[in-house]
Image (tube, rainbow, N blue to C red):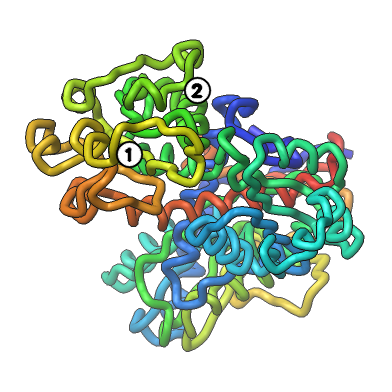
Amino acid sequence: MEWKRRDLLDLQSLDKEEIELILETAKSFRQVSTRDVKKVPALRGKTVALLFYEASTRTRVSFELAAKRLSADVVNIASSSSSSTKGESILDTALNLEAMNVDMIVVRHYSSGVPYVLSKNLKAAIINAGDGCREHPTQGLLDIFTVQEKLGSVKGRNITIVGDVLHSRVARSNIFGFKKLGANVTVCGPSTLMPRCVKELGVEVSYDLEASMKKSDCVIVLRLQKERQQEVFLPSLREYARLFGLSQSKLDKASKDLLIMHPGPTNRGVEIGADVADGCQSVILEQVTNGLAIRMAVLYLLLGTKELQ
Amino acid sequence: MTPQSKILDQENIRRAMMRIAHEIVEKNKGTDSLCLIGIRTRGAILAERLKECIKTVEGKAVPVGILDITLYRDDLSVVAQQPVVHETLIDFDLTGKKVILVDDVLYTGRTIRAALDALIDLGRPASIQLAVLIDRGHRELPIRADYVGKNIPTSLDENVKVILSESDSTEDEVMVKKAGA
């Protein structure tokens, strides 16, 4: 299996073999971060720009460390302190970065589709680090990687994604990725936060979290995205927490082996109880560790296909 | 002119490895703080075999690790396709160890250059020595082997092929053939 893509825009267009190649490559990269010298020279001389138009800690730091541990040079551009406040378009900003011979641009934007626009107009490799409500491919990959590591396999496993599915790019990347590797995916949440045609993605829909948990191997809890909810989707946060929050009492009724994941940041007491987030079934921090290995693998694979354009 | 000729057979390889084991033990005055690091893939197999040979000679087992040098290659920005990365498996500390680096064929020396950089990122060995089954010449870097199974003078248009039963599921042998033959 050879990697042929210049960009990583989504998991929807990747095939099973490509996803498996990234997961396999990530396994080898995990070891780099556990050594005393956390650096290998693979991407020496390459430049990676992180172009973030939305708040982020985990993803941005994860990409930055991944690039630095591969010896690439990193420039960070946060929209709040860039020329976008003077009205420069993101395409202009990106073209200017390219004029300075940046090899790769990692982009996060509140509008869906921005990475595609950049990919069509630039020679630099583009990685989508989250675009609006569409996809967040590296999060999807690290979730699959974590399930594979913890449960041994993905095929045939039952995955429940619970919460604000409507606004979640993580949910979409997870659905595409897990389905391609043969897992059964159930989405669960209040009907107001359920996309209308979600069943067409080949998932089951549930409105009863406890029932879904009983037949699941892993539950991925989504963050309630208050910043994307301009209309009123919920009667109250308390009601949401009672029905769809993953509390210890709900967890007690499910299997002791049920894996709990959350892409972060968590609203403790809303979609996940503090005791659950810190409990022994939660692998939230391991997801973060795995995220670094996944991003190193993606950077390594993409920057190697530069010649193929 | 034969397009392909057999240089070593199974018995020759076994004897060469046994001799190298004797030389390693002699030069290092025993097996204290000795360890073997094989370069993926065939170097790792040869390192395992050397370990068995040293056990026969000295009655002591030395630790063995596997090194993947992909991320340290100097041609990553030249090749069109990224080579597949595999795991480095070394579960002991290299600091203070006498490391015997093991590979199948020594050619340009670039693999060994990468391996030296990789090893030094993993710790500070007391010394690093190099053991290879075949030295075919044509060095591009100032690197030499401490232990050599067999020196084979080759021309640049020849390929040296090492076949080992563990990875190739056929009997051990070393072949030299003309490129394209």
* Chain letter behind tag 1: A
**Picture quarter containing residue B49?**
bottom left
**Picture quarter containing residue B173?**
top right
Give the number of callouts: 2
**Picture quarter containing residue A53?**
bottom right
Q: Which quadrant would the N terminus of chain A be assigned to in this image?
A: top right
Q: Looking at the image, which residue is at 12% across and 43% down?
A: A248
Residue kind at label 2, given as amino acid type? Lys
Q: Earlier in the sequence, mark 2 or mark 1?
A: 2
* Horizontal relation, residue B86 to residue B160: left or right: left
> Which numbered dot is residue A180?
2
* Horizontal relation, residue B123 to residue A222: left or right: right
> Counting other residues with Cα less than 10 Å from the Cα at mark 2, is it few (<14), some (14-19), or many (20 or more)?
some
Q: Looking at the image, which residue is at 72% across and 61% down?
A: A48
Confirm whether residue A274 shows in the render: yes
| Residue located beneath label 1 in the image | A221
Give whichever of B30, B40 is nearer the camera: B40
Query: Which element type, helix, strand or loop, lies under badge 1?
Result: strand
Residue B52 image offset from top left, x and y in percent: 36, 60
Q: Looking at the image, which residue is at 64% across and 26% down?
A: A13
Label 2 – label 1 distance at C-alpha = 20 Å
Judge whether A220 appears above or below B33 on screen: above
Residue A142 image offset from top left, x and y in percent: 46, 44
Give whichever of B65, B102 is nearer the camera: B65
Residue A201 image offset from top left, x and y in percent: 50, 16
Query: Which element type, helix, strand or loop, lies under badge 2?
Result: helix
> Which numbered dot is residue A247?
none
Judge whether A98 appears above or below A153 on screen: below
* Chain letter behind tag 2: A
